[in-house]
């Protein structure tokens, strides 16, 4: 306390000298109880509020005592009171705090004089130090990867910061996802010399804080190492002791930076898609890493993938410690690869042009025979039947291995590009999700807002049907709150025509919805919130249409082939946020074509 009092004395002397130097009448003035109180500084620093008004966070290890000191003025006339969760816990310029129960607590410092008061607020994050092998409580079910952000992306600075924001986390939580998988590359988190990149670390902190705030869990996935790019031919991680030492050292640094987050909220995935020369080499390295991490993180959930790109076929080769209740095994699933990666620019399928079918025979004989010889060789391995049963049989290899080891199983990646046909794509997702639920496999879809995902980079929803499949709510019963025929909407642009059609709900439909065409209608709702927007349409091929609410972000609505261009009407839908009162909903065509439109409905999920 002696040193602290000297610091305070120097501070107030400095303030007095500064005032005297700037005011000829300063000698006649003095600090009094009428001065407005100010909190000059705290040690440790209590972080200020964030951009959206959220409180900063001060990390406190479970059971340890921290001392917080404050400098404030006018010291002689001000009173400082410390509150935790609204209860007074201390007074004066020094506050000691300790808590045996992990959790988030609200700390408020109030400094007041007889006339005024000022405050500083922060969240105290009391984090667990582990329980020596007891189950951490890390439970997950339905999640999504935040890919192509802190991994496999060249974006930096503001561009990178804006690729995933708090509004994205809120949206995912509101939809019903219970966890995020966050791939992070070494080259983003660590400099060449091994220093931590603070900007990247702060983005990780923000994501973890949002997960805590919006009741989601987080998986930190160490995705690509400089010594292990799973697509590179040369992977020094497997041959260099120096690189293996570095790998272990980086993980200890990661834990040091993230240890404040509770064990039941954050998990570590040790390496994405290891591709070692043999499973034995991976087993040796992963067990060394487990041993060293358990010295500092005894109860952190560790997620471990099998050799050869997290293949289901190699999970049984994994050797993991017995009696460790906080290990989870993971695999990835993209089969049949021709369907899931059709037209992917980085594959041999980029320039293929043939219809694919799932479930059933993926490539028909007549379509195969029409391919050039070189493309036939690419497609030949996939000229077989793929069904839910065949996929289940494949995945059951991993299920059996995980059960034999007494651990839970996680499918950390699965996904299908939208470039083949939407009907087959949705059928594949439905089968995967139903298999995961049947076999009690947790899952994280690949991914959120890039080419596999269900949102656009600017946060617009582009595939509500996929979200419903992933969350198991496709069959939710809806109550219609408003209906309007397409021909009765406000119309703009010059290409649309209204045609008679006995199969349409009002006996008419809107055709030639192309170019600069647009439709618009107003809907008034009593309660703000999430609604479904349904479109009744007909089309003979996969098409899309765009919707906007109150001039906001455009959302894409996929309209799968309904089976024809006249009477085969069906529904597509998206999710929209409506304000209480009047809302304007508008539609514009996708440049490559849009459906024939019958009517629009605004619906709520029936409670």
Image (cartoon, rainbow, N blue to C red):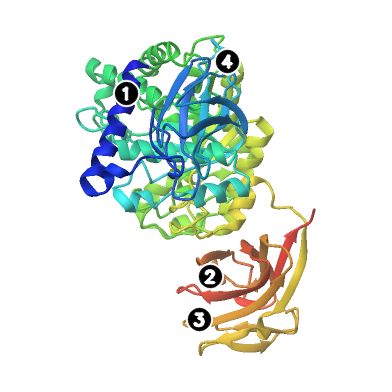
| Disc 1 target residue | 250
Q: In the depicted view, which residue is nearer to us: 1 or 125?
A: 1
Residue visible at 28% across and 23% down? 237
| Disc 3 target residue | 514
Q: Secondary structure at mark 1?
A: helix
- Of the two numbered discs 4 and 1 in the rendering, the one whose residue sits closer to the viewer: 1
- Of the two numbered discs 4 and 3 in the rendering, the one whose residue sits closer to the viewer: 4
Label 3, residues with CA under 10 Å away: few <14, some 14-19, many ≥20: some
Lower position in the chain sequence, tag 2 or tag 1: 1
Q: Position of residue 113 (x, y in %)?
A: 50, 39
| Disc 2 target residue | 546
In the figure, residue 432 lies in which quadrant? top right
Residue visible at 66% across and 80% down? 486
The image shows residue 93, relative to residue 600, as above or below, that is above
Q: Are marks 1 and 3 in contact (CB under 8 Å)?
A: no
- Of the two numbered discs 1 and 3 in the rendering, the one whose residue sits closer to the viewer: 1
Label 1, residues with CA under 10 Å away: few <14, some 14-19, many ≥20: some
| Disc 4 target residue | 325
Q: Position of residue 246 (x, y in %)?
A: 27, 20
Q: Find the distance from the CA under tag 2 to the CA under tag 4.
A: 48 Å
Q: Position of residue 164 (x, y in %)?
A: 43, 49
In the figure, residue 539 lies in which quadrant? bottom right
Q: Secondary structure at mark 2?
A: strand
Residue visible at 36% across and 54% down? 350
Q: Secondary structure at mark 4?
A: loop
Lower position in the chain sequence, tag 4 or tag 1: 1
Q: Position of residue 197 (x, y in %)?
A: 28, 35
């Amino acid at each position: 306390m002696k040193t602290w009092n000297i610091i305070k004395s120097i501070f107030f002397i400095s303030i007095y000298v500064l005032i005297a130097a700037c005011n000829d009448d300063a000698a006649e003035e003095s600090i009094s109880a009428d001065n407005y109180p100010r909190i000059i500084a705290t040690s440790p620093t209590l972080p200020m509020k964030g951009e959206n008004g959220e409180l900063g966070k001060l990390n406190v290890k479970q059971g340890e005592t921290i001392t917080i000191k404050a400098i404030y003025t006018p010291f002689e006339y001000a009173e400082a009171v410390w509150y935790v969760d609204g209860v007074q816990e201390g007074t004066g310029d020094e506050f000691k705090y300790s808590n045996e129960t992990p959790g988030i607590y609200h700390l408020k410092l109030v400094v007041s004089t007889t006339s005024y008061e000022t405050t500083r607020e922060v969240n105290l994050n009391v984090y667990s130090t582990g329980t020596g092998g007891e189950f951490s409580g890390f439970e997950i079910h339905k999640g999504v990867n935040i890919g192509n952000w802190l991994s496999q992306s060249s974006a930096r600075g503001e561009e990178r910061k804006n690729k995933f924001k708090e509004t994205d986390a809120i949206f995912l939580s509101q939809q019903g996802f219970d966890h995020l998988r966050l791939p992070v590359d070494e080259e983003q988190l660590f400099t060449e010399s091994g220093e931590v990149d603070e900007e990247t670390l702060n983005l990780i902190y923000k994501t973890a804080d949002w997960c805590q705030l919006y009741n989601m869990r987080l998986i930190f996935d160490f995705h690509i190492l400089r010594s292990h790019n799973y697509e590179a031919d040369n992977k020094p991680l497997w041959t260099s002791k120096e690189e293996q030492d570095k790998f272990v050292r980086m993980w200890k640094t990661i834990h040091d930076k993230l240890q404040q987050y509770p064990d039941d909220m954050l998990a570590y995935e040790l390496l994405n898609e290891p591709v070692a020369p043999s499973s034995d080499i991976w087993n040796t390295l992963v067990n060394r890493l487990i041993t060293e991490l358990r010295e500092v993180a005894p109860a952190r959930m560790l997620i471990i993938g099998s050799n050869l790109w997290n293949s289901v076929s190699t999970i049984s080769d994994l050797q993991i410690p017995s009696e460790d209740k906080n290990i989870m095994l993971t695999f990835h699933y993209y089969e049949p690869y021709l369907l899931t990666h059709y037209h992917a620019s980085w594959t041999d399928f980029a320039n293929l042009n043939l219809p694919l079918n799932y479930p059933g025979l993926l490539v028909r004989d007549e379509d195969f025979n029409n391919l050039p010889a070189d493309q036939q060789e690419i497609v030949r391995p996939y000229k077989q039947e793929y069904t839910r049963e065949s996929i289940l049989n494949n995945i059951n290899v991993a299920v059996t291995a995980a059960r034999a080891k007494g651990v839970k199983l996680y499918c950390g990646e699965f996904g299908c590009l939208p470039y083949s046909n939407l009907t087959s794509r949705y059928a594949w997702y439905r089968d995967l999700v139903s298999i995961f639920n049947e076999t009690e496999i947790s899952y994280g879809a690949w991914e959120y807002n890039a080419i596999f995902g269900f949102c656009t980079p600017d946060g617009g929803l582009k595939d509500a049907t996929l979200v419903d499949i992933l969350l198991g709510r496709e069959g939710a019963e809806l109550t219609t709150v408003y209906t309007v025929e397409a021909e009765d909407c406000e119309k703009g642009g010059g290409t649309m025509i209204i045609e008679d059609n006995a199969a349409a709900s009002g006996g008419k439909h809107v055709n030639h919805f192309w170019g600069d065409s647009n439709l618009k209608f107003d809907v008034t709702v009593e309660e703000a919130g999430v609604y479904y927007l349904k479109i009744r349409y007909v089309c003979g091929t996969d098409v899309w249409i765009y919707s906007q609410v109150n001039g906001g972000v455009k959302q894409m609505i996929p309209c799968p082939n309904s089976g024809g261009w006249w009477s085969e009407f069906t529904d597509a839908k998206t999710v929209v946020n409506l304000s209480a009162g009047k809302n304007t909903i508008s539609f514009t065509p996708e440049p490559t074509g849009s459906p024939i439109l019958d009517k629009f409905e605004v619906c709520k999920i029936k409670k």
